[in-house]
Image (tube, helix red, strand yellow):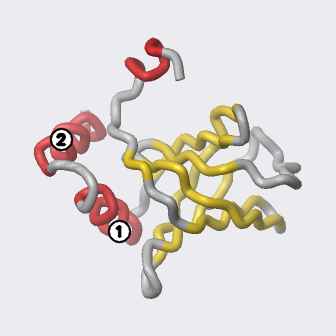
Amino acid sequence: MSDSHHERRRFTRIELALPVEVHQGGSIWHQSLIDISLSGVATDQPKDWDAQYNEPFTLIIKVDDDSTLELHAYLQHVEAGRLGFSVQHVDRENMQPLLEVLQAHMDLATLEEELALLGA
């Protein structure tokens, strides 16, 4: 990743290997999470990837045996077997699971700073 691309990032990305179902219309792709932040998700690219790039996706991340995290996102880039999604909105039901995932892997001060950026 180029330095300028990394500098533009406003939110810390946490590397996690979790199963992800990517839904669009009637299609479902079973993928693996690469990383996650307050504003985005990266997954691996499935072999048979035939999605509509300008249409929204629903990403269902299996956090553990009992919980999932559902995010609504748009595809931002495809590169080297990696898909980058921009999360457009996190509803109330999914904000707490997202925060719990991030809290487990980053310091709280940084997370609070990034949450303030979302509210700005």
- Amino acid type at circle 1 is Pro
Q: Which tag, 1 or 2, sits closer to the chain's start?
A: 1
Query: Residue 4 appears at what percent x and percent y?
Result: 46, 12
Q: Which residue is mark 2?
A: 110
Residue at figure coordinates x 45%, y 56% from the top left: 16
Q: Which residue is mark 1?
A: 97
Query: Residue 103 appears at what percent x and percent y?
Result: 23, 58
Q: Secondary structure at mark 2?
A: helix
Residue at figure coordinates x 66%, y 50% from the top left: 44
Quadrant of residue 11 within the rendered picture: top left
Residue at figure coordinates x 67%, y 61% from the top left: 31
Drawn side of residue 7 relative to residue 28, left or right = left
Query: Residue 66 appears at what percent x and percent y?
Result: 43, 87
User: Do the numbered discs 1 and 2 sit on residues whose CB atoms are within 8 Å?
Assistant: no
- Of circles 1 and 2, the one toward us is 2
* Quarter of the image where the C terminus is located: top left
Residue at far top of view: 4
Residue at far bottom of view: 66
Q: Nearer the viewer, residue 96 or 41?
A: 41
